[in-house]
Structure formats: C-alpha cells, structure tokens
Amino acid sequence: MQAPVARYQSQTDSTTAKYIATVDVSEPTLVDIEVQAPLSRRGAAIKGTTQLLVIPGKDILGDGIVIELPGLILDILSPYTHQSLSKESFNKGTFVFRVNLVMLCGCPISKGGVWDADDFEVRAYLKKEGKLTGSYELNKADVVNLYEGKFPSLEKGSYELTVYAFQNKGNNAGVDRINFTVQ
C-alpha cells in the first residue's frame, strides 16, 4: 500500500472486492458509472463518477474501472448531540471534547501507522446562538482513531460544535456537527 504503482501494474488480485457487469451494446456507447460510499454513513458519503466508451465484444480487463473516493468519517463523541452540560462538566475550567476519525474505507488512523495521525489537521469551531465564539485544535489521543480538544468554561446557552479533519496528502476531508446546551 505504501509502494508506488508502476504503469500497467495490477492493483488487484483474486481477493479484491469487485462488481462484474455485462453491458449488452450493439454499437460504441458512452456510459456513466457512479458509485457512492459508505452507504451506512450518509453524513460521510462521497460520490464518484466516470465515463467510459463501451465497445461491442470488447471486455474491460485487468483492474477494470477504478473510482477513487477520498474522504474521512468523523464522529463527535463528546459532547453528544443535544447533551446538556452542567458547570460540573468543566473540570478545572475546561471541557475535553472527543472525536473518532477513520478513513472512508474504515482503515484506522494512528501515530506512525499506514495512515499516520500526524498527517491530519483536526479543528473545531464553536458557535453560541449562531455567533463564532472560538476555534480549537484537536490532538491525537493515545487511542487509535481518537482525537481530543479542550474548550474553556462556557456561559449558559445553546451551542453548535463543528469539527473538521483534513489530510492534505490525499485531499481527504470529513466533518461532523452537533448542538448542545450549557445549563
């Protein structure tokens, strides 16, 4: 996975997931191919498309059609959606918030791993009743896929927390947004 692929070098083998289709055409036909994934995570779903000229009697061999889907699945774990935080939630004047971050394919992100945590920027924006109150950096925690950030004690009110992650090397991005209150 980390070695460069040479032109015409196969990227697949007999264990690679695939979809085989038979397209019955009587003349050269331009077809649209569209994929969307992951289906189980609609908020993170990315759509990829390509076009291909299909010629009667000619098979598409080798790796077939490969459509890359860049992206990240990001879930805000705490605070959770519509959680009501009390003043006691702010230990020593701060609240630790956490997100889970994985590649769109489900691969883990860890320090020094295939998907190295140091290659990701994870940042949060906090709004109170629609107005930006702060921006916070999240750092990789000791647990695989987990990032943490801190915000200071907050006044009573309704808040919106938006967290994004970005990996410049692969142009992968993900976002999650929740609302919570402070009582």
Image (cartoon, grey):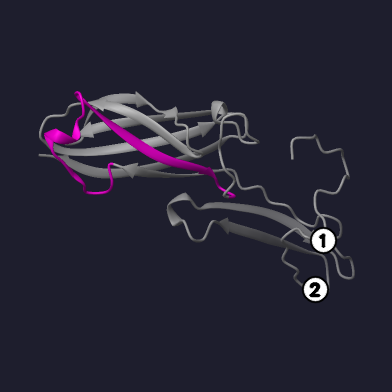
Q: Nearer the viewer, residue 28 or 127?
A: 127
Q: Is residue 141 left or right of residue 86?
A: right
Check disc 1 and report the residue beneath it.
14
Q: Which residue is mark 2?
A: 25
Label 2: few (<14), some (14–19) or many (≥20) C-alpha neighbours in 10 Å: few
Most foreground residue, 99 or 71: 99
Mark 2 or mark 1: name the one nearer the start of the chain.
1
The C terminus, quarter of image: top left
The stretch drawn in magenta includes residue 91: yes
* Foreground residue among 143 and 3: 143
Question: In the image, residue 8 lies at what x, y percent?
Answer: 88, 45
Residue 53, by quadrant, is bottom right
Image position of 123 (left or right of 83) = right
Taking the spot 74% from the left edge, 40% from the top edge, the residue there is 1
- The Cα–Cα distance between marks 2 and 1, rounded to whole angstroms, is 27 Å
Q: Position of residue 87 (x, y in %)?
A: 12, 33
SS assignment at label 2: loop
- Does 81 sit above or below residue 133? below
Q: Tell me the residue at 19%/35% (across/down).
A: 89
**131 falls in the magenta region:** no
Q: Nearer the viewer, mark 2 or mark 1?
A: 1
Q: Is residue 8 above or below residue 63?
A: above
Which numbered dot is residue 91?
A: none
| Amino acid marked by disc 2 | Val
Q: Residue at x 68, y 51 (%)?
A: 67
Q: Position of residue 64 (x, y in %)?
A: 80, 57
User: From which residue to which does the magenta span run?
Assistant: 79-105
Determine the secondary structure under disc 1.
loop
